[in-house]
Image (tube, rainbow, N blue to C red):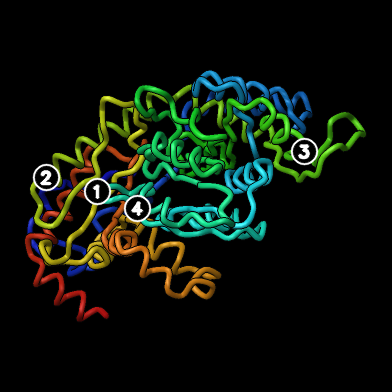
Amino acid sequence: MRMATEANQISSPQSLALFTGKPHFPEPLHVGRPNIGSQEALLKRIHEILERRWFTNNGPMVQEFEARLKETLGVRHCIPICNATVALEIAIRAMELKGEVIVPSFTFIATAHALQWQEITPVFCDVAPGSHNLDPEQVERLITPRTSGIIGVHIWGKACDHECLARLASRHGLKVMYDASHAFGCSSNGQRIGNFGQCEIFSFHATKFVNSFEGGAIATNDDELARKIRLMKNFGFSGFDRVTFLGTNGKMNEMSAAMGLTGIESLQQFIATNRRNYHDYTRGLRDLPGISTVTYDEREENNFQYIVLEVEEAAAGLSRDNLVEILEAENVLARRYFFPGCHRMEPYRSYFPHAGLLLPLTEALCERVLVLPNGTALSPSDVAAICSILRTALSYPEQCRDRLAARA
């Protein structure tokens, strides 16, 4: 494992790589570096797949993965899909959404693209004050006769106000689904996420704390919706040579399912590591001017995957982007999620050039949020070193600003 040098060596601005040109970490430290679990268990599964020569088309590994997902989430159906974007597209089509669908702009671009790809207009909604999730009051103001549904996103695994959204949808005759890409293993009011709305979409991309190399799943307690999704993800086949529905190829392969199963077996270990790092970061960054850490309600189940800071430049003396540059010099590849906001990306920037006027909190968040590395690739000394880098930079903001300006 890559080891950092001692954290206490970073104690003055001149010790930062910004000045020395020598990064603290010898190799890049990524946000979302994959967790692996037991390589022995994974290789055993891969050997079984090769021996069977059954690589796709609902093989034994996919069937077992589906059963484990259902058990873990406590849902009636959890259908593995090749990736979460295709899962979103299939779910949107299966729910027969059309016209306009209200979504947050503060999310990964796939949430919006999955709608626009099917010529459904994503209507961007602001986040609630004090939250990074959809504001139900703003959602209600955006409803028009063309609105067919709402897609909430459980950002950082912290649940949307699904109870309020459910009441709102019921009043207006709308459908609700959730992008739960961040939320595997998380709960709301003691119930596992996966049980809300008509369906919820999970991601098992390599960057997620449980991954299947590339993959996703659709969880639902609606039997008829699940039937349609199963048809749609396999070209509409309802028998060996009988097609009864419009469909596409959304099937998960056996290798991906093998990795997913291996990850689920290590679920609690991954969560424990993330929790430890979260607490170490929280302690290490406490009381820094202009820095606040997004906290998790530990009365609920959390996967603690995302270490999220908000940077207030006026109080910190350095902007979020300044800190990104300082960390990158140290080989800490922090991320500006979800900069610049979906509404400022194409094609939406051209379609809705003034959308930002209705999204003041989202626009502010996109300039403040900084996500730090987490996961099993990090040791406690790594976390301590990252905290030390940030503390040092924020203790000497003027010197750091001058140095950054000179490098520009």
- In front: mark 3 or mark 1? 1
Residue pictured at 51% horizontal, 47% vertical = 150
Q: Nearer the viewer, mark 4 or mark 2?
A: 4
Asked where in the image residue 240 lies, by quadrant, the reply is top right
Q: Which mark is residue 8?
A: none
The residue carrying mark 2 is 286
**Which residue is nearer to you in this view: 130 or 156?**
130
- Regarding residue 204, the answer to whether it shows in the image is no
Secondary structure under tag 4 reads: loop
Marker count (numbered): 4
Give the residue type that dot 4 points to: Val
Instruction: Report x, y in % for residue 345.
Output: 48, 68
SS label for mark 2: loop
Left or right: residue 181 versus residue 302 is: right
Q: Of 195 and 80, which appears nearest the observer?
A: 195
Residue neighbourhood size for the residue with mark 1, other residues' Cα within 10 Å, grouped as few (<14), some (14–19), many (≥20): few
User: What residue is shown with label 4?
Assistant: 127
The answer to whether marks 4 and 3 mark residues whose Cβ atoms lie closer than 8 Å is: no
Q: Which mark is residue 130?
A: 1
Q: Residue furthest right?
A: 241
Looking at the rendered image, the quarter that the N terminus falls into is top left
Q: Is residue 116 visible?
A: yes
